[in-house]
Structures are given as C-alpha cells and as structure tokens.
Image (tube, rainbow, N blue to C red):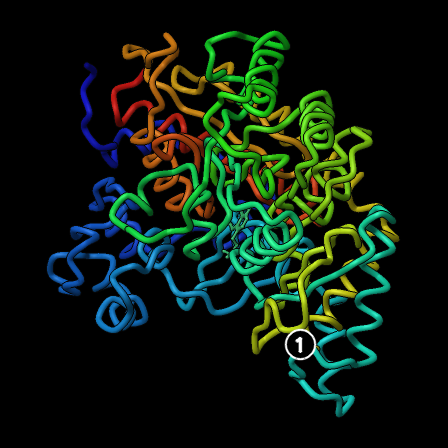
C-alpha cells in the first residue's frame, strides 16, 4: 500500500497551477483562516470533518473550521448531527448568481454542485426572479393545497408541452423528490394490485422510508428496520464495473438478459412487481447511464410483462442530460409509464410532480394527499423556467457545454495516475478514482473514495464546490448549471486538474 499522508501545504503549493483568466480575476477560494482549517481536516466517512461525524460536540478547539466562522459554529451547536453539506463545505453563503457563490467573508466559489443538480439556470436567474416578483405582486395565494388556480393550470400546460403526449395525467406531491417516488410506487401498487417493487443497484430515490428501501447504497439504511418491504434489486448496466465482469456492449446485453430472466423465469423467486423504478442516469450512484439500447430493452421487457416502468427524472430531467428527459437518450424513443420530477421542476422553488399514463389512474380521491402541493410561486417560477428551457433548446446547450467539459476531463484523466473513468451525459458528468495497487472482485481498480474526498477538499480550497457519489464516494461529480459559459468550464476544469495533481502528490498516488 502506498503512503497515505495528507497533502502538505508545500506539496499543494508546488503543483498549484494558474487557473483561467476569469477565475484569476475573482476573489476565489477560502480565507486564509478557512484554508488553514481545511488543511487540518481529515477525510471521514461523511466527507471532511474534523470531529467524529456521530459526535455532535461543537468545540471550536477541536474543529478549526468552526472557529473560523460564527455561522458554522452556530450550526454545529444547534443543528442535527445528521447535517451534511454544512460539514463538507465549511463556509456560509451570502449571495449567489449563475454558477458562483459568495461567502460571508466576500470570498467566491464556483458552484459545480448546484444544489445537487437543482438549479437548471443557476442561482437567481433573471427569468426566475422576475417570475417570483411578478407572482408576489399579483395578490394570488402563495399556497392552495391542490385547489385550482390559474398558476397551476398554466404550469400544467407548460409541463405537458415538454412531455410525451401519452403521459397525460399529473399528480402534485409534497415538494421533495422522495415524495414523488413514494407517490409513484403507491400509484403503481393501486393500479396493479401487486406488492413488490424492483429497483437497481446504485439507485438513489431519496430518504423517505419507501425510497430509502429502493436505495442501492447501504450506508443510510443498514441501521434501520421497517422500511418498505418487498423491494428487489436488479443489476444496473454500469459500463465501467459491469456486474458480470463483461465489457462493452456484450456486458450490457448480459445485464439485460439477466433482467429478462428474472421476469420470465417462473422460479425466479420474485413475484411480478407493481413497477420497476429506474434512473436513466444514476446521479448519486456515480453517473452510470443506460444506453439507448438498454432503455429500449428495459421498456420492451417491462411492457411484455405488463409491468409499469417508472423513470426517476428528479436529477437528470429538465435538459441536464443533453436531452430534455434523460430517458430520451439520443432518440431512444421510449415512453415510460410514470415520470417522476422534482429539483428543476419548480424553477428553484420546491415542487414535485409525476406524469403518468391515464390507465394507471386507478386510485381514488385522497389516496395521496399533502399540505404543500400547491406552492404557487413554484408554479410561476417553474413555468417560466420550463418555457425558457424549451424555447431556448437548453438541452442542446447542455450537450455542447458538457462535451467541452468532458474534453477537459478526458485530458485530465490522461495526465492522472488515479482516474479510472470519466463518464456521463450533458452536464451530468462524473470522474471515478481507483486504486492502482488493489483490485476488486471484478479485477478492476478498487474505488478510491479517499482520493475523491481529498480532491473534493482541495477543489474547495482552490475555490469550487463539488459533489461526490458512486461506490465508496469514489466519483467526483459535475452538475454545472446549463447557463455555464466556456470560460467558466475552463476555469472549473483548471481547478479540478490542480486538485487532482495536489491530491496525487499529497496521498503518494503519483
Ligand atoms: C434521482 C433522484 N431521485 C430522488 C431524489 C430525492 O430528492 P429529494 O432530496 O428532494 O427528496 C434525488 C435527490 O438527489 C435524486 O437524485
């Protein structure tokens, strides 16, 4: 095993490369005090935290990043031990615009995380702000349960304009992604009278008890009992780590054949499910994606066995993937039975909704209620944003800007000793790190979450926040807003390249 010493300041400085012109003109990265605090942080299971993440003690003496910032200290003292990003990104946000954040010390950061892929047009886009202001001045009610309003009708009409026409029914849910996944499963159970559900290895659908049961990652669920029962997991055709150890198209075919066998074999042990729930691109799972062929196969198999196909577009939808919907993947031609939407659905405001085929509409009045299903500001902002995405063909922009970023990431991979794969579509890209000297059960480099964690920390230190995902947190993720400009992409790639080099030196992975 190689040396695992944490990057030293000297090593970091030695490989620090100048970033793009625009970045250089920004007041980029943490203050000296925060940078020193970051340097002192050690990688932890839940990101870089100085204290044990299960220990809610908020002692600034033990955790230097807290001492550097009164807002972090207050959060550590009074917020739940389950808090997440406030630990990982130890600064407090004061303002935000486009793909940049400014903290309370006036320092700036590129936001490559983008509220976990929520802000299609970045922070505080004029289209969204104008729609919100106009709504607030209108005298219309801000909340209305699921009662009829002009704003809701206008939103629904806009949503229908971007959905396949077969999906002619909408159900608004409580406003988080996890709620819409719960609703979709319930709808399919009512419609089919069946009890089992099929989800995928690496899948992520939120933290409610139903969606958590459908989560591939064990970390968040292994300590819990009483999650939704009767969930069965299918292998996902993750190209880099094909679950059958078969590369390329043949690997994908093998996965799809196995899935078909589960449906076709009367002794597979799994009763016919109420639905199959899938992400066309797995976000949190590490940016594996279904090819057009795999999507068509999954649609064929589920249709032939009369099983509703639920596609979770919560993260990949609304143009991020390079198509308006990720299930459309380069003309796949498939139409799911249910499409789940949240995140970008409300134009930066909380909103969750599912679209489905009318033949599934077998539940009765009140079968899935919730107080906050009528957020009218979200309808107004969501309509304005969705109109903008559609009219400006923002999926094409995502594909074009994503290709530029992908080019940089491939170059960085060629220079790196630790990157084993770059993948994704549109502006939903991932870089996987692997250990050169340890292999997994498939004979591939073991996922290197420590390296990804160090890159995440160093990217932050150099002025960019980024999400991690994948097996063992080994995938660094790029979720830029669709309005990102070339010069921002170049600057973000520079920051990432520098962080990778620094981490490779610091962790002795060169
Ligand atoms: C694909 C997918 N589904 C569902 C969810 C859950 O959404 P929320 O966090 O709003 O509950 C997420 C969140 O990241 C997601 O990526």
Callout count: 1
298 left or right of 509 in image: right
336 left or right of 32 in image: right
Nearest the viewer among 363 and 234 is: 363
Give the residue displayed 28% in from the left and 46% down from the top: 48
Image spot of residue 108 (x, y percent): 48, 56
Residue 294, above or below 52: above
Q: Quadrant of residue 42?
A: top left
Residue 119 seen in the figure: no
Circle 1 sits in a helix, a strand or a loop, which is it?
Answer: loop
Give the residue displayed 60% in from the left and 49% down from the top: 193
Give the residue displayed 19% in from the left and 25% down from the top: 4
Residue 154, above or below 503: below
Give the residue displayed 60% in from the left and 41% down from the top: 275
Image spot of residue 344 (x, y percent): 66, 56
What crowding class fits label 1: few (fewer than 14 Cα within 10 Å), some (14-19), or many (20 or more)?
many
According to the picture, the residue beneath numbered tag 1 turns out to be 374
Image spot of residue 438 (x, y percent): 28, 12
Nearest the viewer among 487 and 423 is: 423
């Amino acid at each position: 095993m190689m040396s695992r010493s944490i990057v030293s300041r000297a090593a970091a400085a030695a490989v620090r490369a100048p970033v793009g012109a625009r970045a250089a003109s920004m007041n980029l990265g943490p203050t000296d005090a925060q940078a020193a605090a970051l340097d002192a942080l050690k990688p932890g299971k839940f990101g870089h935290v100085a204290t044990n993440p299960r220990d809610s003690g908020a002692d600034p003496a033990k955790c230097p990043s807290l001492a550097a910032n009164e807002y972090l200290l207050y959060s550590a003292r009074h917020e739940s031990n389950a808090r997440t990003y406030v630990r990982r990104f130890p600064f407090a946000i004061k303002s935000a615009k486009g793909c940049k954040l400014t903290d309370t010390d006036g320092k700036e950061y590129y936001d490559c995380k983008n509220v976990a892929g929520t802000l299609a047009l970045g922070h505080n886009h004029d289209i969204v702000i104008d729609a919100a202001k106009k709504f607030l001045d209108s005298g219309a009610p801000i909340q209305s349960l699921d009662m009829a309003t002009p704003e809701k009708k206008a939103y629904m009409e806009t949503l229908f304009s971007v959905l396949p026409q077969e999906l002619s029914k909408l159900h608004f849910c409580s406003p988080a992604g996890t709620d819409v996944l719960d609703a979709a499963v319930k709808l399919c159970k009512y419609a089919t009278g069946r009890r089992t559900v099929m989800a995928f290895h690496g899948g992520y659908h939120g933290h409610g008890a139903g969606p958590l049961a459908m989560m591939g990652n064990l970390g968040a669920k292994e300590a819990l009992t009483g999650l939704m029962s009767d969930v069965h997991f299918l292998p996902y055709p993750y190209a880099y780590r094909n679950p059958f150890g078969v590369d390329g198209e043949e690997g994908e075919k093998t996965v799809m054949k196995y899935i078909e066998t589960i449906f076709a074999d009367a002794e597979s042990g799994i009763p016919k499910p109420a639905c199959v729930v899938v992400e066309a691109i797995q976000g949190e799972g590490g940016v594996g994606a279904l090819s057009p062929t795999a999507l068509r196969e999954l649609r064929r198999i589920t249709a032939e066995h009369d099983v509703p196909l639920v596609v979770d577009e919560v993260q990949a939808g609304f143009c991020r993937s390079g198509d308006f919907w990720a299930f459309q993947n380069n003309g796949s031609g498939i139409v799911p039975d249910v499409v789940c939407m949240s995140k970008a659905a409300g134009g930066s405001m909380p909103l969750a909704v599912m679209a489905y085929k009318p033949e599934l509409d077998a539940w009765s009045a009140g079968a899935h209620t919730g107080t906050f299903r009528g957020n009218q500001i979200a309808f107004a902002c969501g309509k304005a944003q969705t109109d903008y995405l559609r009219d400006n063909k923002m999926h094409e922009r995502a594909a074009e800007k994503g290709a530029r970023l992908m080019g940089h990431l491939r170059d960085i991979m060629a220079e790196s000793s630790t990157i084993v794969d770059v993948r994704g579509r549109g502006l939903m890209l991932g870089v996987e790190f692997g250990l050169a000297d340890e292999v997994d059960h498939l004979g591939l480099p073991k996922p290197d979450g420590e390296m990804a964690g160090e890159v995440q920390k160093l990217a932050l230190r150099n002025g960019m926040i980024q999400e991690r995902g994948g097996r063992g947190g080994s995938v660094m993720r790029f979720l830029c807003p669709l309005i990102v400009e070339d010069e921002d992409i170049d600057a973000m790639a520079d920051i990432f390249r520098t962080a990778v080099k620094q981490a490779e030196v610091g962790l002795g992975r060169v």
